[in-house]
Amino acid sequence: MEIDLTKLTPDIRHLDDVRGVLYNRDFAKSSPNFELYYMYRKIEEKNGLKYNITVTTPKMLGQEFMKTKGHVHIGNFKEIYIVLEGEALYLMQKGDENNIEDVYAVTAKKGQAVIIPEGYGHVTINPSNVDLKTGDWTSIKCKSDYSLFEKLHGACYYYILQSGPEQASWIKNTNYKSVPKLRFEKPLNEVPQNLDFLK
């Protein structure tokens, strides 16, 4: 499904919207506002589902790779993301500020898909030097809660570039009391034909 985004008006997420969830507090406090990513909402609605597209720039947030603000779904809703262009890292976590029960990351490239399980907060990261374009399907009843990420300054891990030759690494967010070791899963190589599991 090829969609001409130039004919649509996105919601734009700016640095001012995400300062509170960044790893580098000095960068968050001192950097001027700029555009981070573009959300084209409800491009299509069918069978109780909605389809969105997000274009995430490759700009750095201080030491941290560009990312979305992060949220968890209100209610028992799953979501599926499809990488349309570029490469994405998805970080998924289940739990609260006292105890993260599970946390894992998935790398997905063009044509691959990632399912967000119900109850898992999630962040999309652009680890590359080109725009990341993703599509996502979820229930039209699904709403997002950003409060945990706002309260604890982001997800339970940050993906940052440390000193040295391209040393990208995961760093625990110490605002969480208990965080397990990060595990890694593989993406789906194609999108399931039946998306009823998202309702």
Image (cartoon, rainbow, N blue to C red):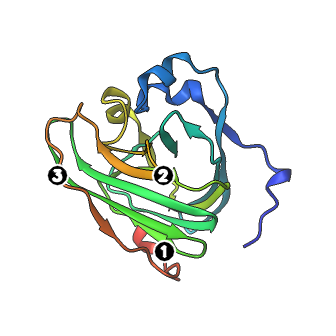
SS at circle 3: loop
Residue ID at (65%, 59%): 133
Q: Is residue 168 above or below residue 3?
A: above
According to the picture, the residue beneath numbered tag 3 turns out to be 180
Q: Is residue 190 above or below residue 155?
A: below
Camera sees residue 170: yes
Front-lying residue, 41 or 128: 128
Residue ID at (64%, 54%): 129
Question: Residue 141 in the image: x percent, y percent?
Answer: 47, 52
Q: Is residue 166 above or below residue 16?
A: below
CA neighbours of label 2 inside 10 A, class few (<14), some (14 to 19), many (20+): few
For marks 2 and 1, the one nearer the N-term is 2
For marks 3 and 2, the one nearer the N-term is 2
For marks 1 and 3, the one nearer the N-term is 3
Label 1 sits on what residue type?
Answer: Leu
According to the picture, the residue beneath numbered tag 2 turns out to be 165
Residue ID at (31%, 44%): 171
Label 3 sits on what residue type?
Answer: Pro
User: Cα distance, mark 3 to mark 2?
Assistant: 28 Å
Front-lying residue, 155 or 138: 155
According to the picture, the residue beneath numbered tag 1 turns out to be 195
Label 2 sits on what residue type?
Answer: Pro
Q: Which quadrant holds residue 103?
A: bottom left
Quarter the N terminus occupies? bottom right
